[in-house]
Amino acid sequence: MEHLPRYEFQKCVARYRGDYQQKSFSCWDQFLAMGFAQFTYRESLRDIEACLRSVGGKLYHMGFRGKVARSTLAEANEARDWRIFADFAQVLIAVARTLYADDPIGVDLDASLYALDSTTIDLCLSLFSWARFRQHKAAIKLHTLLDLHGNIPTFIGITDGKVPDVRMLDEIVPEPGAFYVMDRGYIDFERLYVFSLSAAFFVVRTKKNVLLQRRYSREVDKSTGVRSDHTVVLTAINSIKVYPDALRRVSYVDQETNKRFRFLTNNFVLPALTIARIYKSRWQVELFFKWIKQHLRIKAFYGLSENAVKTQIWIAVSVYVLVAIVRKRLRLEASLYQILQILSLSLFEKMPISQALQPSDSQPELPDPGNQLILFDL
């Protein structure tokens, strides 16, 4: 917890008056309790309460100033503005991005590279009626813009399951010179033209029904998997009105799966193979979704309201980013998964965190087994 900027957290609390008329259970207590639930993968509010009470003598030294009761925590998740924790997550994201700015991304690219995608989290319609998705199903979508330097989420939008992915392009402010890689669900030429006007670049997989006319062909080395590299223009009237500039279409065959991909981009400088590799790096956002679903508590929720769900998700994101920050600051070689597993067992141990996370080469002294009795006589 010492790696958390407490002053910045209090600024977020004051912005939304989170501790107004609260004396016994502050927003910081709420964050610690929910963070504990993420680190140890607690099943319910009752589970959180029972586990924290079992180490009651250590709670004060961990930063808790109020009594953690199930009903109190439930009321806090329902009533306190989820934007407190969303804003604080953005503070941690800014710290993490600075630490991971020089990390390699697996592509020969000097600019920033972002991957945009979404994942759906299924809910029970009878319990989460505000998140109606279909007639007999509820769901929310987690829209994420992932900075591939360190796989740090820079933008997260939480919506109901009916919101189309492409609408998230309206929420993103393109960074000049950066590259954004997206799947076919984000093809909207009016929105994509905003990237060109902002001097940003996009790489998106095209659809079969996109009408294009070839203007120029470049030579390619087909041994690399690249099949064609064309300069094209849109021919549909509605499309060319909103995107009047030329585009670049790259056709690539994955040598492992023998599957053909066609990409559209507004960058005409990078080699065609680099464009294909940029799109291949989009898979990192899929791995990010898989990781947080497996190792964080974001598929089952402690509260039923929209505010409680968003609070839990944003605290889960904060935990993910916090572990990434600790890993970088302490120069740990262990993966985020390994660090999370170790912390889940040693949260209340009185030892330096670096000692718990650093691998030990020393072997414990085991007693001489010569005088040991045999438990099972075979």
Image: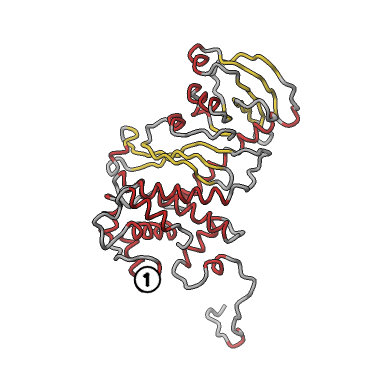
Residue 63, above or below 295: below
Residue 372, picture quadrant: bottom right
Looking at the rendered structure, the kind of residue marked 1 is Val
Residue 109 point in image, percent of width and height: 66, 38
Q: Residue furthest left?
A: 21
The residue shown at (61%, 36%) is 280
Nearer to me, 194 or 378: 194
Residue 262 point in image, percent of width and height: 61, 25
The residue shown at (48%, 34%) is 173
Q: How is the image coloured?
A: secondary structure
Query: Quick check: can you spot residue 202?
Result: no
The residue shown at (50%, 44%) is 153
Nearer to me, 185 or 17: 17
For disc 1, the marked residue is 55
Query: Quick check: can you spot residue 53?
Result: yes
Q: Quadrant of the N terminus?
A: bottom left
Q: How many numbered discs sit on the rendered protein?
A: 1
The residue shown at (40%, 60%) is 36
Describe residue 235's horizontal placement relative to residue 306 as left or right: right
Residue 14 point in image, percent of width and height: 33, 52
Describe residue 274's horizontal placement relative to residue 121 as left or right: right
Residue 244, above or below 16: above
Residue 54 point in image, percent of width and height: 35, 70
Residue 217, above or below 22: above
Check disc 1 and report its element: helix, strand or loop.
loop
Q: Residues within 10 Å of mark 1 (few under 14, many from 20)?
A: few
Q: Quadrant of the C terminus?
A: bottom right
Q: Residue furthest bottom?
A: 371
